[in-house]
Image (cartoon, rainbow, N blue to C red):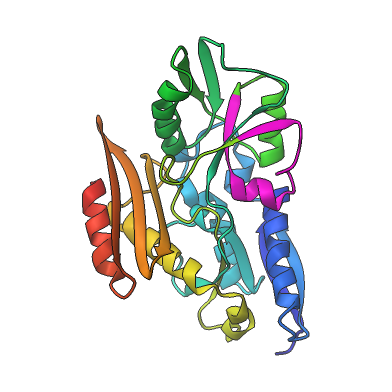
Amino acid sequence: MRSKTIRIGTRKSALAVAQANLVAEALAKTGTGLSAELVLKQTEGDRILDRPLLEFGGKGVFVAEFEQALLQGEIDFAVHSAKDLPMELEEGLGIVAVLEREDPRDVLVTPASKDISGKREIVIGTSSLRRKLQIEEIGKTMWPEAVVRCENIRGNVPTRLSKLMEGSYDGILLAAAGLKRLGLWEDSQYDYHCFDCETFIPAGGQGILAVEGRLDSGLEAVVKPLEDETARLCLSLERRILKLLNAGCHEPVGVYSRLKGGEMEVLGISRRGEETKRIHMRGETGDLDRLALLAAQGLM
């Protein structure tokens, strides 16, 4: 290798940088003597904040710039939240490492100083159709006297938290993984209501960091020590199901899997038209294609 510096592409947000630094730190611990340099880029998804993602391209708006940079040799790897990856990657690119999964749960964040239980209408900020579907269902139990109304919210995690504290929303829905990676888990300004993954099904890949790279770069060995086999297994299954469903940002779909007792357990939720479908099934780790097909059929 001509250079001992590995160039890692990442978005400019505090969370994206924190996640890329996790990969850089993990690389430093492999003992190869390689150092990592972060290459920051602003994506279309970061530039357009006044419209929901589904209006201008879906998940790929956070990834396209990095895929071009990889193909042109500007960077060696890109670090993504796995849930932001589109189903189809550019030809010649692939997920070359999957890190151990962080907390996959969704969290309702409310100001610690504000009791919303007595309100007649509760406004929740989320840009996710999956979260909207589930909080509106769960809200009937959490706040039986109130109407839950979801309003779109975009921007990075600190921006969303600022909007919450300014009073624009009664609560916002975020991923536990992001809050933990930003060091906000113990912040006393906020109350966190964590939903278990059976009650509130996460997005496919939620909590997982994926390293994307060129398949012909010869650098796969550099990131191989970062690979977590269980997270890879789960991400592979979740992405297969989403691909079979042809699911992007345009309809509410949640898929979550875990290794339990030597088997794969998978939970899912989807809504097409007026019907909400849920699945909860198990299958062999050696036959993910069959399990993915059964899961997708249950959610269609």
**213 relative to 175, above or below:** below
Front in this rendered view, residue 34 or 280: 280
Q: Is residue 41 something one can see in this rendering?
A: no
Q: Residue at the location (28% across, 72% down)? A: 287
Q: Residue at the location (54% across, 76% down)? A: 214
Image coordinates of residue 10 in percent, x first then y, are: 67, 59
Front in this rendered view, residue 75 or 87: 87
Residue 214 placement, left or right of 1: left
| Region in magenta | 171-192
Front in this rendered view, residue 279 or 133: 279
Q: Quadrant of residue 99?
A: bottom right
Q: Is residue 48 something one can see in this rendering?
A: yes
Does the magenta segment cover residue 186?
yes
Image coordinates of residue 244 in percent, x first then y, are: 28, 57
Image coordinates of residue 119 in percent, x first then y, are: 55, 11
Residue 269 placement, left or right of 25: left
**235 relative to 227, above or below:** above
Image coordinates of residue 40 in percent, x first then y, are: 72, 58
Residue 98 placement, left or right of 2: left
Q: Residue at the location (30% across, 51% down)? A: 280
Q: Quadrant of residue 79?
A: bottom right
